[in-house]
């Protein structure tokens, strides 16, 4: 199963951070509009990601809700009809809530750097260090810490959980289905 090391941090000055990321990146910026619907499930998390171009991905993942670097195991299944799949999953599993965001993607080596503007939450940085099969998590954790340092992201801005959890904690309408 594919794995990566993830870190999420709140961002105070997204344009300044984007300039620092761009200076390190081999690819980007790439703007991506995403609409994630989370569903009830018994193991990990299940979300359907719909893109502005009409395609989608069903993503099942397991990741601890911890501040700092964490290992995420995931499976992704593409879909050409995310609206129909959302309706089917909502009917059978029930929706937890939705997260809408604008994401700017950069690639630095094997790390995907996301600069996110999340509706109802604000601006964030996400790092995803993609691990090779059988690779020890420590290498990815070290790489993530190194990138955070290079980008000047303070540890006090690190976040735990997923955006859907932060929306629920903020009590926004997008996460009202959690209650």
Image (tube, grey):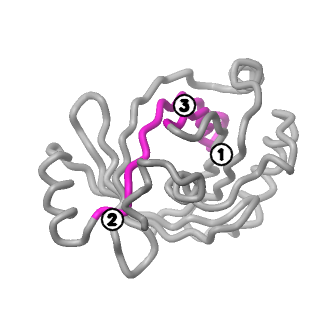
The answer to which of marks 1 and 3 sits earlier in the sequence is: 3
**Residue carrying label 2:** 39
Give percent across and percent down for residue 41. Answer: 35, 75
Q: Residue at x 54, y 28 (%)?
A: 104
Give percent across and percent down for residue 174. Answer: 41, 48
Disc 1: CA contacts within 10 A as few (<14), some (14-19) or many (>=20): many
The answer to which of marks 2 and 1 sits earlier in the sequence is: 2
Real-space Cα separation, disc 1 to disc 3, in angstroms: 10 Å
Disc 3: CA contacts within 10 A as few (<14), some (14-19) or many (>=20): some
The answer to which of marks 3 and 2 sits earlier in the sequence is: 2
Q: Nearer the viewer, mark 2 or mark 1?
A: 2
Q: Residue at x 17, y 71 (%)?
A: 92
- Is label 2 in a helix, a strand or a loop? strand
Q: Residue at x 73, y 35 (%)?
A: 11
The numbered mark at residue 127 is 1
Give percent across and percent down for residue 48. Answer: 31, 53
Which part of the image, by quadrant, shows the C terminus? bottom left
Real-space Cα separation, disc 3 to disc 2, in angstroms: 25 Å
**Main SS class of the magenta portion in the image:** strand
- The magenta region covers 95-119
Q: Is residue 43 above or below residue 36?
A: below
In the drawing, does residue 37 fall left or right of residue 123? left
């Amino acid at each position: 199963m594919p794995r990566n090391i993830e870190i999420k941090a709140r961002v105070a000055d997204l344009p300044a951070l984007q300039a620092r990321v761009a200076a390190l990146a081999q690819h980007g910026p790439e703007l991506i509009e995403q609409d994630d619907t989370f569903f009830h499930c018994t193991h990990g998390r299940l979300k359907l990601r719909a893109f502005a171009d009409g395609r989608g991905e069903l993503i099942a993942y397991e990741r601890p809700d911890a501040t700092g670097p964490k290992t995420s195991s995931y499976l992704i299944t593409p879909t050409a009809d995310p609206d129909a799949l959302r309706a089917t999953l909502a009917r059978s599993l029930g929706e937890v809530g939705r997260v809408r965001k604008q994401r700017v993607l950069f690639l630095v080596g094997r790390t995907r750097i996301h600069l996110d503007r999340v509706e109802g939450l604000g601006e964030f940085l996400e790092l995803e260090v993609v691990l090779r099969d059988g690779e020890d998590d420590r290498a990815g954790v070290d790489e993530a810490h190194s990138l955070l340092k290079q980008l000047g992201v303070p540890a006090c801005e690190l976040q735990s959980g997923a955006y859907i959890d932060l929306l629920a904690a903020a009590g926004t309408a997008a996460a009202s289905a959690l209650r």
